[in-house]
């Protein structure tokens, strides 16, 4: 599959100018994540490189959970509820619990989750203006909304770098 | 050492508005790279996790070389000369040659190089306006200048993700 990889960052119709540039960055980062996991099997997604390593599947879950948590922080202007913490905590924290629980899913499971979360992000960003982007995040006033959404892309790219490294070391499974 | 980690992306005095936001992203990415390598010894920087792995030192060289090559592309509006390709090629390409050559340097060597390259980037960005940021890169017109400089930060973050992973697996050297 070919994932379109937008290599221009500029204002985008349907978004305020600075928000459009940000959407370009989020979209570019996502296109590279999708390319990095293209064609992986359940075994590939579950593989643990060593006892402290996160699986590629868990990293994909993490990417979606980070985006969802920043939706709550910046669009809903509140901290995660204890129910949301329960739901997202494993993917957010990674580590032992994620190694135990986040496995057995096909690639589509992770990609559907990422696409559903992204759809909400784009809808919410389209409804906001550049003044909103500069404002402090209400429940975390040290950061502003623009940093928050840059960070969502930036954390994804951090883990995409790890996914590329891990993918290059998956055990070869020769076809029968 | 504490590296200031700017967690607001907004216009910055001394830069055009969109360029200032971009400088915030470059600075944030760099602060996290510096934090990720803080205190590493020559042995740590040279360590190879496996036969296909890049050392953390080589990744730091790569980060500086990518930034330098995008200076040439976007500020000098030309492709790398064969001399520059010679000089930067090993760090840009990584792999076998980098594993052979990029070793034996203390952290300061890499950090001084990164700081010198960054100083040139900031000087050049301060002299440009937001219309420049939107324009196509002359020797690579498919991309525009904003994507080019977002990509410099993005590639750095990709490798910072790998540096964090590799740092967590450095052989422990118990002090005598």
Image (cartoon, coloured by chain):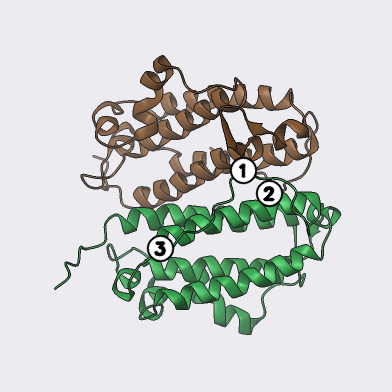
Chain colours: A green, B brown
Q: Is residue B79 left or right of residue A145?
A: left
- Which of the two residues, A69 or B78, is positioned nearer the viewer here? B78
Q: Determine whether A30 is above or below A42 in the image.
A: above
Residue A155: x and y, percent? Answer: 54, 56
Q: Is residue B119 left or right of residue A60?
A: right
Specify the farthest residue to the left: A176
As helix, strand or loop, the secondary structure at mark 1 comes to helix
Identify the image quadrant of residue A114.
Answer: bottom right
Name the chain letter of the residue that bears numbered label 2. B
Specify the farthest residue to the bottom: A83
Dot 1 and dot 2 residues touching (CB under 8 Å)? yes
- Give me the C-alpha separation between circle 2 and circle 3: 30 Å
| Residue that label 2 marks | B7
Residue at mark 3 shares a chain with residue at mark 1: no
- Res A142 visible: no
As helix, strand or loop, the secondary structure at mark 3 comes to helix
Mark 2 or mark 1, which is nearer the start of the sequence?
2
Name the chain letter of the residue that bears numbered label 1. B
- Give me the C-alpha separation between circle 1 and circle 2: 7 Å
Q: Determine whether A159 is above or below A101 in the image.
A: above
| Residue that label 1 marks | B28
């Amino acid at each position: 599959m070919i994932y379109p990889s937008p290599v221009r960052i500029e204002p985008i119709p349907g978004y305020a100018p600075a928000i459009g540039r940000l959407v370009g960055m989020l979209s570019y980062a996502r296109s590279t994540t999708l390319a990095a996991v293209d064609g992986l099997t359940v075994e590939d997604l579950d593989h643990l490189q060593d006892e402290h390593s996160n699986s590629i599947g868990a990293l994909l879950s993490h990417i979606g959970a980070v985006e969802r948590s920043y939706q709550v922080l910046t669009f809903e202007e509140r901290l995660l509820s204890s129910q949301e913490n329960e739901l997202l905590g494993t993917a957010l924290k990674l580590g032992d619990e994620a190694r135990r629980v986040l496995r057995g899913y096909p690639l589509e499971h992770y990609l559907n989750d990422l696409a559903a979360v992204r759809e909400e992000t784009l809808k919410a960003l389209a409804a906001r203006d550049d003044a909103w982007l500069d404002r402090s995040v209400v429940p975390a006033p040290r950061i502003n909304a623009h940093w928050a959404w840059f960070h969502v892309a930036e954390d994804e790219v951090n883990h995409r770098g790890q996914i590329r490294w891990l993918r290059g070391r998956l055990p070869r499974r020769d076809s029968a």
